[in-house]
Amino acid sequence: MAETALDRWERRMLAVGHVIPYFVLTVTTALYLVLSPHDRGAKLISLAVVAFTYAWMFWWFTAHPKWRTRQGLMAVFIIGMLVLYGYLGLRETWFGAVSFAVYVYAGEVLKVRWMFVAVATTAVLATMSLFGGVPSGPEFTAFLIFGLLFVTIACTFTFVGHVTTEQSRKRKEMVAQLAATMEENAGLHAQLLVQAREAGMLDERQRMAREIHDTLAQGFTGIITQLEAAEQTGDWRARVATATRLARENLTEARRSVHALRPAPLANAALPEALAEVVEGWRGATGVPVEVTTTGTARPMHPEVEVALLRTAQEALANVAKHAAASRVGLTLSYMEDVVTLDVRDDGVGFDPGATGGEGFGLMTMRQRVSRLAGAFEVESEPGLGTAVSASVPAIPTAVTT
């Protein structure tokens, strides 16, 4: 999944947050060396503690990023930071700013309850650093007020940071889930097309078997019968002429069957042009006027989708020619965002879909072809009011492969 601008910003902010503890410790140490009244021996002790603090942060946090999810190790790390910060802060007020380092670390590595405990403890240590310890007398009241103020501010900012981090985490989870869902849907589409292709191959085999049985096999049987009769009778010329006629008819049927394996209109044309070619041929054969309309923006669809719609149009027009006795036919191809719809309407004799004892072979074939693409197929008709056939299939683009 590609990194968004917000992800890059969060990554950079996190990197800056990891640098802040070192920066704060460096600045406060420099101020301490320049402005503190401590003698050289005391400063050397402080520098030794500062050096140990650098090493502690580097070893427990920077050098071992995988440790940050292990609560036991991080508890040791934060406790060590509190001890080191408490010592430096009580030794010199300048080191009070090191509290920012503890806030950063606690907010990232501790669970919510212990995070607030560490932050509140750090705020109390910062107050003690400001006052040089726990004062007595009139200053104690001021100490309590400042302590409460520091704890409140520190916990508030920590809470806001925690909520922001959680929202970011949930957003990333939602984006990841959405991406996974989209990938799964693409896989389902691809699987659907594979199943449709396999089912289509089976349909074609069954269709070819019916075609061969009903036309070619019967034709060859007739040819053989005529040739055998020509050997046994003297009327061989008539028998051979009949056999020749049957052979020509079978050749025509064979060419038609082979042509039906792959829609020729789709070979070099888009679906709207292919439909127009089919309609023009049908109009020339039947003499029935046909109005063809395309709505929406035509765009290339997956071959399985285009073949399904073209075959549906061919079968619907064949049914009109056989049964409807129509004087006018309308064909509409509609491209929508998610589906492509084909509607074929005629003003023929119509029929009662509920009284036919089941769908005919043509309607059943159309419905099966559309259903295998997870589409919808509907037929509306009434006696004397014509028939409307509608097929809707998913608008799967050519980019989807199987």
Image (cartoon, grey):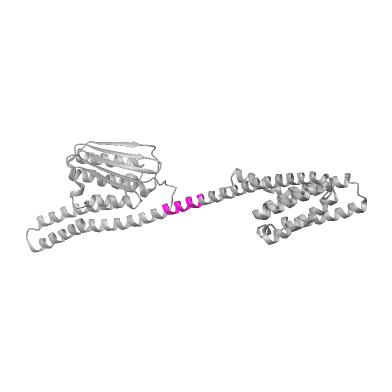
In this picture, residue 113 sits left or right of residue 136:
left
Where does the image place residue 152, in percent across and percent down from the top left? 70, 45
Q: Nearer the viewer, residue 126 or 74?
A: 126
Where does the image place residue 219, in percent across and percent down from the top left? 18, 57
Residues in magenta?
178-189
Q: Quadrant of the C terminus?
A: bottom left
Q: Nearer the viewer, residue 135 or 3?
A: 135
* Total numbered circles: 0
Q: Does the image show residue 261?
A: no
Seen at 18% across and 55% down, the residue is 247
The quarter of the picture where residue 288 lies is: top left
Where does the image place residue 264, in percent across and percent down from the top left? 31, 46
In this picture, residue 369 sits left or right of residue 175:
left
Q: Is residue 280 above or below residue 40?
A: above
Q: Nearer the viewer, residue 242 or 79?
A: 79
Q: Residue furthest front?
A: 137
Q: Does the image show residue 144?
A: yes
Q: Any magenta on residue 184?
A: yes
Where does the image place residue 240, in percent across and percent down from the top left? 13, 56
In this picture, residue 219 sits left or right of residue 59:
left
Q: Any magenta on residue 309?
A: no
Q: Nearer the viewer, residue 155 or 143?
A: 143
Seen at 55% across and 51% down, the residue is 173
